[in-house]
Amino acid sequence: MPEVGKQIAALPMRWKKDGTFQVLMVTSRETRRWIMPKGWTMDGKKPWAAAEIEALEEAGAVGYIGQEVIGTYTYKKKLSDGTSLKCEVDVYPMVVERLKTNWKERDQRKRKWFSAKGAAKRVNEPKLSELLRSLSNKPAKQPIIREFLKAS
């Protein structure tokens, strides 16, 4: 077993018509705390493509995913045998075009839009909170988001 697990996450985001920036969070299945859609890397899939699949399965989010990591954070994942594994998660930005009403994990999770600051307050991981806070002030002006938006 590796000492550090590698995971990928999508950071689903949108700008409302009034210009308000929001991020989409989902609840975890076990602890019900707010997290970003994330999972293990997938064989034969690019990491951002795997993150896009997680966003669809866990949040019903459909959109455009970036290929550049906008941040990384770590957390301890509880495994089925009761032990925990330190996981490093690469975060990919995703602009959500629409939310499906019918998606794979809809009976296991809640999903909700938050301001970046609101999302930052709800997550347990300091590095993830920091990343979300960095987006709370003019997210489209952040170099990596600006590049991603230009490409999308």
Image: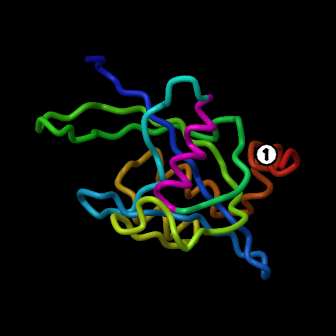
Is residue 16 shown left or right of residue 50?
right
Residue drawn at point x = 29 percent, y = 64 percent: 32
Q: Where does residue 129 sit, x and y in percent of width and height?
A: 47, 54
Q: Where residue 105 sits: x, y (%)?
A: 41, 60
| Residue wearing tag 1 | 148
Identify whether 58 is placed above or below 128.
below
At a point 63% along the width and 38% down the height, the residue shown is 49
Q: Outermost residue toward the left? A: 82
Seen as rendered, the residue at the extreme right is 150
Q: Indicate the amino acid at tag 1.
A: Phe
Name the chief secondary structure element in magenta: helix
**67 is higher (above) or lower (below) than 132:** above
Residue pictured at 72% horizontal, 58% vertical: 139
- The x and y percentages for residue 148 are 79, 45
Quadrant hosting residue 44? top right
Magenta stretch contains residue 143: no
Query: Quick one: quadrant of the N terminus?
Result: top left
Rendering coords of residue 137 (x, y %):
68, 63
Helix, strand or loop status at disc 1: helix
Q: Looking at this view, is 74 or 5 the one in front?
A: 5
Q: Is residue 18 above or below residue 81?
A: below
Look at 78% across and 57% down and name the residue there: 140
Residue range corresponding to the magenta coloring: 46-59
